Image (cartoon, helix red, strand yellow):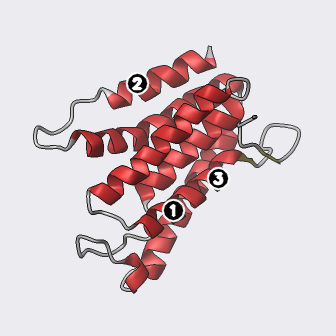
């Protein structure tokens, strides 16, 4: 049941009506920023681990926001478009947070589904680079932050903390 809700949330966000002038690839990236975490939240709720998921999600978002504030005005935070607060990529962090949670906790017995979630998250990051909103370094940092919080489990409401990639070869 949780997989059906996860896929429904991801697909629903990807089909949301984009602005008329939006680039389809950039629109996909924005949809995955919301779709992957929403799918992971649906799965977490179904599995009775929504509180742990929510705490990790809030901490991930707070860390990204804090880093954007801390590094604003420094060269590492300058966007290719000239704006600031580009370090790290929040879109990529959110997408990798959702992908890592899905792959490690919802699709743990389906590595191909986990690979698809990680692939969608990677495309989200690439869409931000192609849109001129982030440098590859900003995207990689966002991916690392999101992945770390998504793959972790703080053990809230369960037997203990853990870290799961969800990829078995």
Q: From where the camera sits, is residue 127 visible?
A: yes
Does dot 1 land on a helix, a strand or a loop? helix
> What is the number of the mark on residue 11?
2
Q: Residue 103, position in %: x, y?
A: 64, 35
Q: How many marks?
A: 3
Does dot 2 land on a helix, a strand or a loop? helix
Dot 2: few (<14), some (14–19), or many (≥20) neighbours within 10 Å?
Answer: some
Name the side, left or right, on which 56 lies relative to 9: right
Q: CA distance from mark 2 to mark 3?
A: 23 Å
Q: Residue 139, position in %: x, y?
A: 45, 61
Does dot 3 land on a helix, a strand or a loop? helix
61 to 112, vertically: above or below: below
- Hey, which residue is sitting farthest right in the picture? 159
Name the residue tied to disc 3.
Answer: 149
Looking at the figure, which quarter contains the C terminus?
A: top right
Q: Closest to the observer: 69 or 100?
A: 100
Choose the circle earlier in sequence order: 1 or 2. Answer: 2
Residue lying at 58% horizontally and 49% vertically, measured from the top left: 57
Q: Residue 167, position in %: x, y?
A: 71, 37
Name the side, left or right, on which 56 lies relative to 27: right
Q: Closest to the observer: 157 or 87?
A: 87
Name the residue tied to disc 1.
Answer: 140
Q: Closest to the observer: 81 or 130?
A: 130
Q: CA distance from mark 3 to mark 1?
A: 14 Å
Residue lying at 50% horizontally and 71% vertically, measured from the top left: 66
CB under 8 Å between discs 2 and 3 = no
Depth check, mark 1 against mark 2: the one in front is 1
């Amino acid at each position: 049941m949780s997989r059906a809700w996860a896929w429904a949330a991801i697909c629903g966000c990807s089909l949301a009506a984009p602005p008329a002038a939006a680039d389809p690839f950039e629109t996909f990236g924005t949809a995955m920023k919301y779709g992957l975490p929403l799918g992971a939240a649906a799965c977490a709720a179904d599995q009775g681990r929504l509180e742990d998921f929510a705490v990790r999600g809030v901490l991930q978002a707070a860390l990204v926001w804090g880093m954007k504030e801390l590094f604003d005005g420094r060269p590492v935070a300058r966007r290719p478009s000239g704006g600031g607060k580009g370090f790290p990529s929040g879109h990529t962090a959110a997408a990798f947070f959702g992908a890592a949670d899905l792959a490690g906790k919802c699709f743990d017995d389906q590595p191909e589904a986990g690979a698809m979630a990680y692939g969608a998250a990677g495309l989200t990051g690439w869409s931000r680079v192609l849109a001129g909103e982030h440098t590859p370094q900003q995207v990689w940092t966002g991916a690392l932050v999101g992945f770390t919080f998504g793959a972790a489990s703080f053990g809230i409401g369960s037997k203990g903390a853990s870290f799961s990639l969800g990829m078995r070869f």
